[in-house]
Amino acid sequence: MKRFIRFSLLFVLGACSAGVTFAQTIPFEEYDLPNGLHVILHEDHSTPIVAVSVMYHVGSKNENPERTGFAHFFEHLLFEGSDNIGRGEYAKYVESAGGVLNANTSNDRTYYYEVLPSNQLALGLWLESERMMHAKVEEEGIETQREVVKEERRQRIDNQPYGTFLQEIMAHAFTVHPYRWPVIGSMEHLNAAKEDDYVQFYRSFYVPNNAVLSIAGDFDLEETKSLIGKYFAPIQPSEKPVYRPNITEPPLKGPVIDTIYDNIQLPAVIQGYRIPAQGTPDFYAVSMLAQLLSQGQSSRFYKALVDEQQKAVFAGSIPLPLEDPGIVIAYGIANLNVSTGDLSSAMDEEIKKVQENLISEDEFQKLRNQVEKDFISSNTTMAQIAESLANYYLYFGDSNLINTQIDQYLAVTRQDIQRVAQRYFTPANRVEMIYLPKSVKP
Amino acid sequence: MYTFIDKKLLLSGLIVFGLFHGLIAQDFRAHAPEPGPAKPIEIASPDQFALDNGMKVILVENHKIPVVNFQLFINRDPLVEGEFAGFSTMAGDLLATGTTSRTKAEIDAAIDFIGASMTTSSTGAFGSTLTKHADAFLDVYSDVILNPVFPEEEFEKLKTQTLSGLAAAKAEPESIANNVVSKVNYGPEHPYGEVQTEETTKAITLQKCKDYYQDYFKPNLAFLVIVGDANHDQAMAWAEKYFGTWKPGPVPRTVVSPVPLPEETAVRFADKSGAVQSVIQVTQPVDLKPGDKDVIAVRLMNNILGYGGFSGRLFQDLREDKGYTYGAYSSLNSDPYVALFNAETSVRNEVTDSSVEAILYEINKIREEPVSDKELQLTKNITSGQFARAMERPQTIATFALNIARYGLPEDYYQTYLQRMEAVTVADIQRVARKYLQPDHLNIVVVGNKDEVVDKLKAFGPLYYYDNNGDPVQINATDISDVTPESVIKGYLQAIGGESKVGQIKNVKAEMVAKTPMGEISMEVMHKDNMKSVMKISAQGMVVQEQRFDGEKAMISQMGNKELIDDPAMVNRFKENAAYFEDLKFLQDGYHIEIKGVENVDGIPAYRLVVTSPAGSISTYFYALESKLKIRQVQSADGNTTNIDYKDYEDHDGILVPKIMSISGSTPVPMSFELSSIEFNPELEDAWFSVDN
């Protein structure tokens, strides 16, 4: 639970890139139970362990704007126990079996998993089915976890230099879409919520027809299928369709600029440009553009801003892989005596170069080679494979992207990279957060 | 009838069956399912060989994906770097910044082009590449290890970056805590007790880095660990081709003295004004070497106390039962020189003392009470689970082989590990807890908001103060019963020229210059009628920041972006700072002054005065006992602390003014301003203070 949620880093997840010559094959089998639960199974006997996971298609974007932070709160609450699991026992079962467990929440989905010795597969299925069937959503657990979440907020956001950057940039980039509030949500909302609010949220979203059960590791296929039937088939689907917001964010009439005073020593420039949703051709092109700017020491931002001009101590660019249209972030932490204005212009200058000049064949080949290495390296452990399979199915309805997503990257051309730089990296489409030390706040 | 009975029987049978079925359904859910038969955990033996020059090679084959990783490890003794602390780290970072045949840009381009990654450090280099690019990779990788040239320009760049990094770390309470933990547990003379600071970094020379490389980068100290998609012949050929010409030679050795236990349990406190959480690390140096017969029992004992999951007693107690924290854990790993026990957590201010108490309680409990059989079994399961999961990564096998070679462990040490773990008893756990955890010799390190948390910590032992670098801050027990805050301020005013003389100063204009690694910065301040002020900071001839206060309104401009201040609290702060000699005001109505004792500031005993303005803003000032001069000012706002040190007072028109003013905390690196001119009561135009233009 040390690394419990990692919503601030979650955007790295879907950023696994593509390959070229190596035909990767991660075999799997998948099917639906009658209650709507989607099951994905990947068998691998090299180590006697098994990863059991459930991904629910609920994240902060499914929340009521007056009750934000629920999805993340449930990430904590659903460890509190069930009809058959005593309070605080959930983790003990896993750890006494020699396993580990954790969970994380993003704007779009919540993920729970256990990695167990493979002879404990049934335990993992029992635990996850209990969580889905009749978790304990009661006052005592709610109270404890409220305190824990507040400490988490203090530790990971309030007490962390630049810890608020993601929530600030999303709050400025979105005005109507639920991406405008942070995944960890509002402590006031959590305080104000009644037990019944929590119960309703549980019944609406933590249901088999809104979940993917993904298992990877050392197991027997037929035996596992029968166990899955035994534990999950009796769970009732929700009666009402699952709420999925259909909210279109109007174009940003930027540029939007704001200053944040934080407990930091070095000022920072953090820019967000609105981009299409993950899985679209332009998203892949933007990913490769971000890679051009910031992957490796020969990348444009690193070379120009950190190494040559020494305007930044760090600089980079990351697209957030979101289900609805989201943003790509470009950031730089200013070096000593470099003004944020100066750094911001230097970042713009690098983007302008991409907009004005087609990148060289050589540099383009570098991006493709990096994509290949990253794609091949991204799914080696059972935990990674279980999560990737679930992600690909839940977002795109295509688990086999674990083997083929590389083709989407390979389809990107040099012209595409230039085009997306011109199309999305514009002043009107940008929010810029200037982080300054609180000490200079007059 | 018959049919009826039959039907009825059938019906009741169905009901019974249904109920029964329901019961079974209930029943299988009521308890956790039993595990299947446990599968053995297989630990492969890696392939090992050596080159003629003494370099040892460890190969772990794994052909799941076409990727191969290389780790070159220099197995040297720990170093004492003293006043140059950090030079080995810098030398390691410089390896990949230029070789006899490649510039940094060429190295970066070559590694990135093949999609590989490479990092270098003081004890070697790590890299990962697709197998098909392995030769291209090794060509560059071996080049940075064998032929680095340590370019002067890259050295200067790295120094600046390191200083920025150190500055950023100052804002992090965890890194302050780590500095204190290192210094108080190992002592500043021990290799593990060294802390790299701005000062030691500035002292490092390029020659130090080159010498370090020449001394230690020898094949006779080196291991090349190859993990992944490669076989024996290939590994052998790569090692010979890329490292075969490397020349062996003698290497310096370090004698590391043993570390004594702390004499007493004491609280070691570092102030982080404005913090909303306290970082707590309850620590102790421990003598536990790799391969010691107690290592496995100690690992189990530590897992019971502070396992990094949910089950540890610290986590259960501080998080799940009390809700004090997001996490609480402990660690105690063997080390060939000196190990460290550390129980750590971050908690909100109000529960800082309760959390220390809870940690001490758990330490005592594991010593005094035998753990239950069930808890021991749980922890054994956790530990063997950790072991099994680690086997998923082929790197684990390589690490095992490296440990066996480095620490002279028996060849079957890891093969028999789980077997030996099963043999550990409840009595063993208590025995090692009593042997290795000494509650009367703990360093309780806390970094937090002094004014809110420190008083209640005195219950745990004597209290010592430390600065951000882990160096002691002296707080004296001087008798101050007959000293009043007013007398301290009057004493200061007397010392600088007398209250009446200072009182006649209405206008002041001063200029200061600071030399920084990035060039000169100048600061100009003007004060008019003790109620208007201007401050301008310029770098490279450009005004980068300007603040003005016209007596009523305030503005701040950054790089020409002007912002009018509308927050009344901020405007008020300008008002409070509008006079050059602000201390005069402290004696006026509405100000509250309090003496908080005597502390050493850079070795000079000084009164600590806490001044609260009529509007409620709080600042701390230090006035030297002997000279009466003001030597430090500390301002905290919103969790950020600024230190201003005043030094080398000199006479200007009969008034003593500090020649040196050093600002730290709020600036990326400490900046030392030297006074270049000061004028008293010059003519100053109102327009210069206007916020409207």
Image (tube, rainbow, N blue to C red):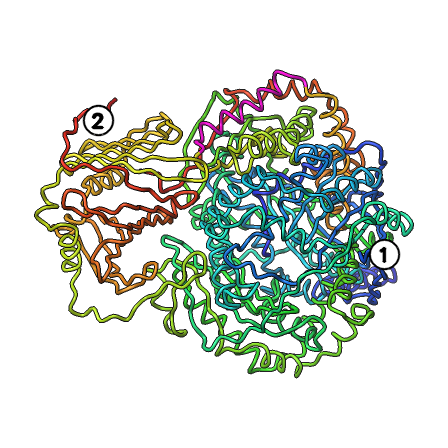
Of pointers 1 and 2, the one earlier in the residue sequence: 1
Residue that carries the numbered disc 1 in the rendered image: B52
The chain under label 1 reads B
Give the class, few, some or many, for how many residues have Cα within 10 Å of label 1's Cα (few <14, many ≥20). some
- Check chain identity for marks 1 and 2: say if they share one: yes
Q: Name the residue located 57 percent from the left edge and 77 percent from the top edge.
A: B366
Per the rendered image, the range of residues in magenta is A338-358
Q: Is residue A353 above or below residue B219?
A: above
The amino acid type, in three-letter code, at marker 2 is Trp
Q: In this view, does A121 lie above or below A22?
A: below
Horizontal arrangement in the rendering, residue A110 relative to residue B562 (left or right): right
The chain under label 2 reads B
Please identify the quarter of the rendering in which residue B541 is found.
top left
Magenta stretch: includes residue A341: yes
Residue A289 drawn at (x, y percent): 65, 27
Q: In which quarter of the image is the C terminus of chain B?
A: top left
